[in-house]
C-alpha cells in the first residue's frame, strides 16, 4: 500500500493516455461480461443438467415421435429409477418473435424428476386440478405480465385440436421459480392428459423420455442398455446424458462457446497490445526516474514489482469497472426481452474475469517490468 | 563564511587522526562500447576520513562521476576494491548493495531527479518506503528533512511548482532523510544560478560542519570547491591535489 501513491502518481502522469487505456480495458471487460451472459443463455441447461438424468429420443431424429409404450420398457431396464415422457408443443403466442419453449409433460412425474423447480404447494395443487392448466416460469410470467388465472391463447402450426382448430387456450395454473442460478424459468409446461385427448392426431405418441438412473456412475452403461432394448424395432432410440442433449441443441445454432471465445480472445489480444504499449512507453520515458529509485536503494525486484503493480492497478480498475457495467447491463434484462431462457453472468465467469485481469496485467507489464528490473543504474543516470 | 576563511581550511591530504570512512584501492574502471574500450580510471587510490567535505574536480570525461558512482555503490570497479565504513561494497550482491545504499548513502544530482508526479514531501519520503517505518513516522521524518533545508512551507508543492534552488533543496532533503553516513553530490550547483548555488553550498557546508556528514562533491566550479575541506583533481583517471597541466 505504501507504494500506491507512487503507482497512482505515475498513472496520472499522462491523464489522456491513461484514460484511453482504461477505457479500452473497460470496453473489453464489458464485452467479456455481456458475451458470457449470452453464452450462458445459449448453453442453458448444460451446466445444471442432472448427472443422474438421461434423455432417450428417437434414433432417426428429434422430431420423430415414439410410442408411449416405451416408458414401461425403459422403467424395466436395470439401473433405471423411473422415466417420464415429454413432447415438444411448439406453439406461437401472438407472433413468432414471442418464442418460448412449450413442453408437454406429466406434471407429477416431471416435478419429481426436476426438484430444482421451485413451486408452492398451492400452485402445484392448482395445476394438478386444472386439465387446461399450464405451469409457467417466473421470467416468462414477467415477460408477458401473465398471472395465475390468465387465459393464454396459443396458435399451433404442429398440433391441431380435434376438428382442425389450431388455436389452443390454456389457463395459467402455476408459476415456478428456480432453486439455483442457471435454471430456465422461461418455459411453459402443458399437461399431457389434456394435450393427448385434445390433439387431432398422434395419440399415444411422445417426443422423448427423461430417465433417472440409480447410479450416475453407470449412466453410460444404462444408456446403452436402454438403446439395446429397442434395437431393430421400428422405433430405435438414442440415449444420452442430459448435458449432451442440451449441448446438441446449442450446437444447432453453431458452436456458440467457440464463437464467443474467439471474439473475446481477439478483443483481449488487441487490449493486450494497447496495455502493453502503454506500459512500455511509460517505462521508456522515465528510465531516469527508475534509475533514481534504484540509486536510493530500491532493489531490482522492487522496481519490477512497481511496474507490474502499475499494470495491475490500471487493469484492475478497468476490468472491475467493465465487469461492473456488464453486471448492471445484464441485470437490466436480456436484449431479446425475455426470449433467452437464462441471462446472467455466472460466478465462474466472474472468477474467469478476475483471472483475465491478473493475466492481462502480468503479460502487459512483464516485459517493461523486466526492462526496468535489468536497468543498470549508473548507465541510466548517465543518459 | 568568507571565501578567504573557507580557503584557509583546505588541505590536500586527509586530516590525520580521523577515522577512515572511504578506502578506494587500486581501482580500474573500463567501459566497453561496442568494439571500443575506454579506460576511465586506472589504479586509483583514495582515502576519505569520516566528516570530510571533499571536492572532486576535473575536466569532463575525467571519471569524476564514475568515481562517485563507485564510492556510492551505483557501479562496480573492473579491478580493485571499494571499502566504505569497513564494508567491502564491490563484493556485495546487487540486492545487498541496494540495501546498503538505502542505509548509508544520500545522493544529490545536478538535475535534481525528483519524481514529477510526487509532492516535495512524497519525494523526500521515497527512500523511507524501503524501511519499516509507519506512514506517520515517514511523514514526520520527511517534514523534518524539508524543515532542515528550509522548505517546510513547500511540503505539498510539486517539483514543477518549485524553483531550481528549491528543487535542489528537496533533493538534498531526500538525500539526508535516512540520516546516511555519506552524501554524494554530483555537480549540485551545476544547474543553478549563483545565488541559489551559494544557498545550496551553504546548506551542504552546514550539513558537514554541524551534522558531521561526510560529503563528496563533484564540481567544475572552483567557488564550490572552495567550500570543501579538501579538493582533489582527477584527470586521465588519476587523482592529484593540484590541477594537471
Image: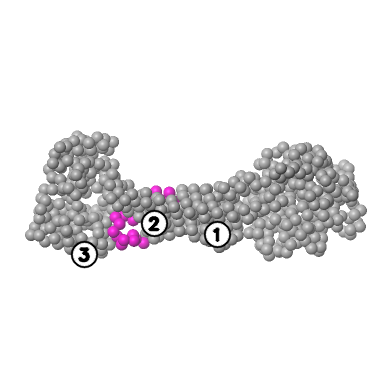
Q: Residue furthest front?
A: B35
Q: In the displayed structure, does residue A230 sit left or right of residue A43?
A: left
Image position, residue A261 (x, y; %): 40, 50
Q: Which residue is drawn at 63% across and 59% down?
A: B117
Image position, residue B12 (x, y; %): 89, 47
| Above or below: residue A184 compared with residue B159 | above
Q: At numbered mark 1, what does the secondary structure look like: helix, strand or loop?
A: helix
Q: Mark 3 lies on which chain?
A: A
Q: Is residue A182 visible?
A: no
Q: Which residue is drawn at 10% across and 55% down?
A: A200
Q: Is residue A145 visible?
A: yes
For label 1, the residue is A18
Q: Nearer the viewer, residue A62 or B182?
A: A62
Q: At numbered mark 2, what does the secondary structure look like: helix, strand or loop?
A: helix
Q: In the displayed structure, does residue A244 sit left or right of residue B59?
A: left
Q: How crowded is mark 3: few (under 14 residues within 10 Å), some or many (20 or more)?
A: few
Question: Do the residues at discs 1 and 3 belong to one chain?
Answer: yes
| Above or below: residue A14 compared with residue A215 | below
Q: In the displayed structure, does residue B3 sit left or right of residue B122?
A: right
Q: Nearer the viewer, residue A230 or B175?
A: A230
Q: Mark 2 lies on which chain?
A: A
For label 3, the residue is A94
Image position, residue B69 (x, y; %): 75, 46
Sequence order check: which comes first, mark 1 or mark 3? Answer: 1
For label 2, the residue is A34
Q: At numbered mark 3, what does the secondary structure look like: helix, strand or loop?
A: loop
Disc 1 versus disc 3: distance between alpha carbons? 51 Å
Question: Does the magenta portion include A341?
Answer: yes
Magenta part, dominant SS: loop
Magenta segment: A332-353
Classify residue B142 by image quadrant. Answer: bottom right
Classify residue A342 by image quadrant. Answer: bottom left
Amino acid at each position: 500500500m505504501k507504494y500506491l501513491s507512487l503507482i497512482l502518481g505515475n498513472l496520472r502522469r499522462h491523464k489522456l493516455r491513461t484514460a484511453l487505456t482504461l477505457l479500452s480495458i473497460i470496453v473489453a471487460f464489458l464485452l467479456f461480461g455481456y458475451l458470457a451472459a449470452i453464452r450462458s443463455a445459449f448453453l442453458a441447461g448444460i451446466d445444471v443438467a442432472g448427472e443422474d438424468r438421461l434423455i432417450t429420443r428417437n434414433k432417426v431424429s428429434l422430431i420423430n415421435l415414439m410410442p408411449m409404450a416405451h416408458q414401461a420398457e425403459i422403467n424395466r431396464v436395470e439401473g433405471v429409477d423411473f422415466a417420464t415422457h415429454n413432447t415438444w408443443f411448439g406453439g406461437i403466442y401472438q407472433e413468432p418473435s414471442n418464442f418460448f419453449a412449450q413442453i408437454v409433460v406429466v406434471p407429477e412425474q416431471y416435478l419429481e424428476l426436476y426438484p430444482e423447480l421451485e413451486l408452492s404447494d398451492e400452485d402445484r395443487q392448482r395445476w394438478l386440478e386444472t386439465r387446461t392448466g399450464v405451469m409457467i416460469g417466473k421470467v416468462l410470467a414477467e415477460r408477458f405480465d401473465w398471472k395465475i388465472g390468465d387465459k393464454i391463447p396459443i396458435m399451433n402450426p404442429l398440433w391441431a385440436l380435434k376438428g382442425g382448430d389450431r388455436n389452443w387456450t390454456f389457463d395459467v395454473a402455476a408459476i415456478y421459480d428456480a432453486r439455483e442460478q442457471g435454471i430456465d424459468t422461461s418455459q411453459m409446461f402443458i399437461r399431457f392428459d389434456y394435450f393427448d385427448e385434445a390433439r387431432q392426431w398422434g395419440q399415444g405418441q411422445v417426443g422423448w423420455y427423461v430417465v433417472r438412473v440409480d447410479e450416475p456412475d453407470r449412466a453410460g452403461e444404462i444408456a446403452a442398455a436402454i438403446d439395446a432394448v429397442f434395437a431393430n424395432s421400428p422405433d430405435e432410440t438414442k440415449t444420452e446424458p442430459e448435458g449432451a442433449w442440451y449441448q446438441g441443441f446449442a450446437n444447432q445454432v453453431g458452436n456458440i462457446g467457440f464463437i464467443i471465445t474467439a471474439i473475446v480472445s481477439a478483443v483481449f489480444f488487441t487490449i493486450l497490445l494497447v496495455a502493453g504499449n502503454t506500459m512500455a512507453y511509460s517505462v521508456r520515458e522515465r528510465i531516469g526516474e527508475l534509475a533514481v529509485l534504484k540509486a536510493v536503494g530500491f532493489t531490482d525486484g522492487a522496481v519490477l514489482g512497481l511496474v507490474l503493480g502499475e499494470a495491475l492497478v490500471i487493469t484492475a480498475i478497468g476490468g472491475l469497472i467493465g465487469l461492473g457495467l456488464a453486471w448492471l447491463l445484464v441485470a437490466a434484462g436480456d436484449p431479446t426481452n425475455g426470449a433467452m431462457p437464462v441471462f446472467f453472468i455466472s460466478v465462474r465467469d466472474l472468477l474467469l474475469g478476475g483471472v483475465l485481469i491478473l493475466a492481462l496485467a502480468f503479460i502487459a507489464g512483464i516485459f517493461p517490468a523486466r526492462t526496468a528490473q535489468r536497468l543498470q543504474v549508473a548507465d541510466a543516470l548517465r543518459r | 563564511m568568507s571565501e578567504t576563511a573557507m580557503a584557509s581550511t583546505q588541505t590536500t591530504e586527509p586530516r590525520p587522526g580521523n577515522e577512515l570512512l572511504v578506502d578506494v584501492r587500486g581501482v580500474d574502471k573500463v567501459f566497453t562500447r561496442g568494439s571500443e574500450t575506454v579506460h576511465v580510471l586506472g589504479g586509483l587510490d583514495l582515502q576519505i576520513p569520516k566528516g570530510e567535505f571533499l571536492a572532486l574536480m576535473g575536466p569532463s570525461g575525467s571519471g569524476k562521476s564514475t568515481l562517485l558512482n563507485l564510492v556510492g555503490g551505483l557501479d562496480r570497479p573492473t579491478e580493485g576494491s571499494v571499502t566504505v565504513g569497513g564494508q567491502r561494497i564491490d563484493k556485495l550482491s546487487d540486492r545487498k548493495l541496494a540495501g546498503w545504499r538505502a542505509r548509508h548513502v544520500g545522493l544529490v544530482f545536478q538535475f535534481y531527479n525528483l519524481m514529477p508526479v510526487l509532492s516535495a514531501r512524497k519525494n523526500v519520503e521515497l527512500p523511507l518506503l524501503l524501511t519499516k517505518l509507519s506512514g506517520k513516522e515517514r511523514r514526520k521524518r520527511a517534514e523534518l528533512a524539508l524543515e532542515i533545508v528550509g522548505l517546510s512551507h513547500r511540503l505539498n508543492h510539486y517539483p514543477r511548482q518549485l524553483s531550481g534552488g528549491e528543487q535542489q533543496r528537496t533533493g538534498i532533503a531526500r538525500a539526508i532523510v535516512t540520516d546516511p553516513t555519506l552524501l554524494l553530490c554530483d555537480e549540485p550547483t551545476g544547474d543553478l544560478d549563483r545565488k541559489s548555488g551559494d544557498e545550496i553550498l551553504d546548506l551542504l557546508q552546514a550539513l558537514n560542519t554541524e551534522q558531521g556528514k561526510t560529503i563528496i562533491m563533484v564540481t567544475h566550479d572552483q567557488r564550490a570547491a572552495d567550500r570543501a575541506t579538501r579538493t582533489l583533481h582527477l584527470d586521465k583517471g588519476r587523482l592529484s591535489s593540484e590541477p594537471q597541466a
